[in-house]
Image (spheres, helix red, strand yellow):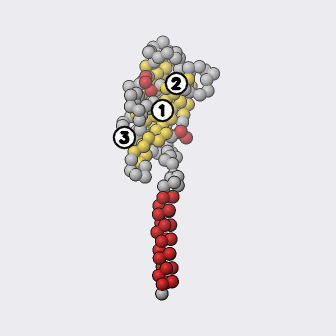
Amino acid sequence: MSNVIGYILLVTIAIVISTIVFQWMRTYVPTEPLGCPDGVSVFVKDYNYNCTKNQLNFTLTNKGRFNVSGYFIHGTNSSSQELAILDLTPYTPIGTGGNPDTEGLAMFNSENNSFGPNNKINNTFNFTNSSFGQIYSIEIIPVRYQKTNNNKNRIISCSNAKIKEIIVCS
């Protein structure tokens, strides 16, 4: 009889230890990263770049299936430059300078994906106080808020929906 009790205790202890190890190891398994859904798409419908006033106006249109909350915008100051590295958000009223969570973003509405499909928005950038001179191209990467597993909103960059527009003075 004591052998049976010993085996029952051994099996019970093994099950308890394996449950503890399983719960501990589950925290080490990487979860699926948050990603932007396929079908996010924006484009520059039309633009006007006044080189003498150093002002850029463009209409951004959401042609995707999902709402977005804003965008990253970078520019080039040379016609031979391939990679847009100049952050242009400080030169627009919807730029979010000062907030470390949304630094470098042009946001339509905080904590909300408010820019829906087929919506259009006019954007104005005033570069009169800039040090870089003329803009030759812009790159726009849309961003949106996604819910995490613990139901928190996180900003997700939709780099697969990046667009590039060559800018010519008018």
Disc number placed over residue 44 in the picture, else none = none
Quadrant in the rendering for residue 107: top left
Q: Are marks 1 and 2 in contact (CB under 8 Å)?
A: no
Q: Where residue 87 sits in the image (x, y, percent)? A: 49, 26
Name the residue located 38 percent from the left edge and 31 percent from the top edge: 99
Q: Secondary structure at mark 1?
A: strand
Q: CA distance from mark 3 to mark 2?
A: 26 Å
- Upstream in the sequence, badge 3 or badge 2? 2
Q: Secondary structure at mark 2?
A: strand
Q: Where residue 49 sits in the image (x, y, percent)? A: 49, 20
Specify few, some or many for label 1: CA neighbours under 10 Å numbering under 14, 14-19, or 20 or more: many
Residue furthest top in the image: 52
Name the residue located 43 percent from the left edge and 19 percent from the top edge: 126
Q: Where residue 170 sits in the image (x, y, percent)? A: 51, 17
Q: CA distance from mark 3 to mark 1?
A: 16 Å
Name the residue located 36 percent from the left edge and 40 percent from the top edge: 111
Q: Amino acid at mark 1?
A: Phe
Specify few, some or many for label 2: CA neighbours under 10 Å numbering under 14, 14-19, or 20 or more: some
Work out whether 148 lies above or below 102.
below
Q: Nearer the viewer, residue 6 or 132?
A: 6
Q: CA distance from mark 1 to mark 2?
A: 11 Å
Residue identified by numbered label 1: 72
Q: Where residue 67 sits in the image (x, y, percent)? A: 42, 42
- Upstream in the sequence, badge 1 or badge 2? 1
Residue furthest front in the image: 2
Q: Secondary structure at mark 3?
A: loop
Disc number placed over residue 86 in the picture, else none = 2
Work out whether 89 lies above or below 31.
above
